Amino acid sequence: MSIVLYRPDAVLVWRNDEVVKRLRWYRSVMLNKTPAKFMILKSIPVDVKLDDASDEELWKHNDELHREALKLFDEYFEKDANPAKLKIVEPSFLDLKINLAYRILKKCHFCEWRCGVNRMEGRIGVCKLDHRGYVSSFFHHYGEEAPLIGIEGKGGSGTIFFASCTFHCVFCQNWDISQPSGSISDAGVESDARRLASIARRLRIDGAANINYVGGEPTPNLHIILESLKYLDVNVPILWNSNMYMSEEAMKLLVDIVDIWLPDFKYWSDECAKRLSKVGSKKGYREVVTRNHLIASENGDMIIRHLVLPNHLECDTKPILKWIADNIKDKVLVNIMEQYRPEHKVILKPELYKDIARRPYREEILEAYNYAKQLGIIYEPVS
């Protein structure tokens, strides 16, 4: 006898008018009333020879087709999600994005580290990956935010965990896959685009509400993820669960693919980001992540996650909530997370990280909640 997990809050959340309004696209795709963005992209023809065109020509064409895609998203909304009724073309807008992704891989700048190595030739980037991707696990996740579990509170989020990360958080709870002590290949099974598509297909057929790319961090695997969508033949919302340290070029590839964003907004202070997540590229954490949150808020539904760190209300939590309120408050939901616990390097050497060597006090969490409420941020349905 099979066991069906059930979360009542995942049913009740859809009775909240603000949740329905802010996640209207995602909900419609989840219910198969609207084709996922990647399905629509397969129907948009490309008028240039992909292999012969210059990078400049392909990016120009990407921008032009982005505008066309936005019109089609409106046209298809709540109309019909039957993939058979979409006329698939070759090459398509999706093929153009795949081609651009593999070009980026030759001088990699998927993230703002911009390490520039040729991962196609086997060189290793900051992410500790060459061109290959490794899946650590995949399953129906029932611990995500209530709207991500399924419209009837069952099905779960079809979560695919990738090995490796572009950050090195000292408190990482998934450090064994994001920062493994040995080879990155020990943290997962090598998975090409066809295997990844097969995983996603199985998850959706078995009832998953979405395909949730996470890790570690999905960004270094962008080329594989995009190519896998070429082979994915079932309608399903694409969820991007990320630290949001992607480059502008990566964001341009993603905005026409992602149906719902699930970004982390960890820090406001660049110093905190550098000390606790080892983010030290030329562009600071705040500059990159605020830019990408703004872009994402204009291109898909979004639930922002902010993990409250002990002793970091003034330097990080409150400024982040204020920025959200000033810039994208009416477009997003915010999960103010109280799950922090000392892990990884913090628990091994608490004397080096005294500020975060404990769980947050209840008073700190309540202060964060109250501040969000004062700012008019919608957080309660997903926190």
Image (cartoon, rainbow, N blue to C red):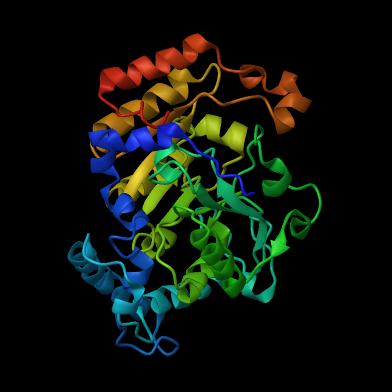
Q: Position of residue 84 (x, y in %)?
A: 34, 78
From this view, report whether residue 31 is shown above or below residue 5.
Answer: below
Q: x, y percentage for residue 179?
A: 71, 46
State the residue lying farthest toward the top. 363
Q: Quadrant of residue 265?
A: top left
Residue 361 seen in render = yes
Residue 237 falls left or right of residue 343: left
Toward the viewer: 105 or 232? Answer: 232
Q: Quadrant of residue 95?
A: bottom left
Q: Position of residue 360 (x, y in %)?
A: 56, 17
Is residue 118 in view? no
* Frontmost residue, 100 versus 340: 340
Q: Is residue 255 left or right of residue 265?
A: left
Nearest the viewer among 201 and 173 is 201
User: Along the line of sight, which residue is nearer the eye, 133 or 8?
Assistant: 8
- Residue at point 54%, 29% (across, down): 272
Q: Please name the residue shown 45% across and 56% down the image.
A: 247
**Residue positioned most to the right:** 182
**Numbered circles on residues, count:** 0
How far across and how far down the image is residue 60, in percent?
30, 75
Residue lying farthest to the front in this orientation: 1
Q: Is residue 292 left or right of residue 355?
A: left
Height in image: 238 above or below 154? below
| Residue at position x 43%, y 33% in the image | 8
On the rendered image, what quadrant is the C terminus found in? Answer: top left
